[in-house]
Amino acid sequence: MKTLKETAVGETVMVVKIHGEGAVKRRIMDMGLTRGTEVYVRKVAPLGDPIELRVRGYELSLRKADAAMVEVE
């Protein structure tokens, strides 16, 4: 199992599953990270948090704690 947190910069992956529950899972899904969505990891901040992604044609910054809940392939 690989998560979005472990994905290298410049890599394009597909969302397989969102882990977590309740409001946290809902918030991640509301940002456009749903099963089957392609995600391009654009860059990582100098201290490693947050991660900048390109999802559905827009830029999204996501904390590493949230990125660890997104399983990708």
Image: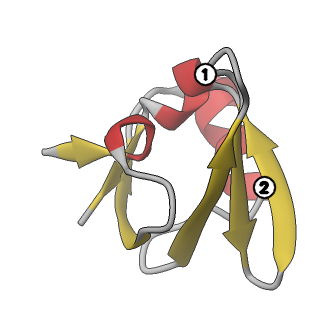
> Residue 38, how many percent across, how many down?
51, 80
Kindly give the residue lying farthest to the bottom in the view shown: 57
Amino acid type assigned to the residue bearing label 1 in the image: Gly
Q: Quadrant of the C terminus?
A: bottom left
> Residue 64, how many percent across, how many down?
57, 24
Kindly state the secondary structure of the residue where label 1 is placed.
Answer: loop
Left or right: residue 7 versus residue 44 is: left
Residue at the spot of label 2: 30
* Mark 1 surroundings: few (<14), some (14-19) or many (≥20) residues within 10 A: few
Picture layout, residue 23 above or below residue 47: below
Left or right: residue 22 versus residue 46 is: left
Residue at the spot of label 1: 48
> Residue 25, how many percent across, how many down?
59, 37
Amino acid type assigned to the residue bearing label 2 in the image: Asp
- 60 or 42: nearer the viewer: 42
Q: What residue sits 72% from the left and 29% below the top?
A: 50
Kindly state the secondary structure of the residue where label 2 is placed.
Answer: helix
Q: What residue sits 66% from the left and 50% below the top?
A: 43
Kindly give the residue lying farthest to the right in the view shown: 58
Q: CA distance from mark 2 to mark 1?
A: 23 Å
Q: Quadrant of residue 28?
A: top right
Picture layout, residue 35 above or below residue 65: below
Q: Which mark identifies residue 21?
A: none
Q: Are marks 2 and 1 in contact (CB under 8 Å)?
A: no
Left or right: residue 40 versus residue 11 is: right
- 36 or 40: nearer the viewer: 40
Q: Nearer the viewer, mark 2 or mark 1?
A: 1
Picture layout, residue 28 above or below residue 64: below
Q: What residue sits 38% from the left and 71% below the top?
A: 13
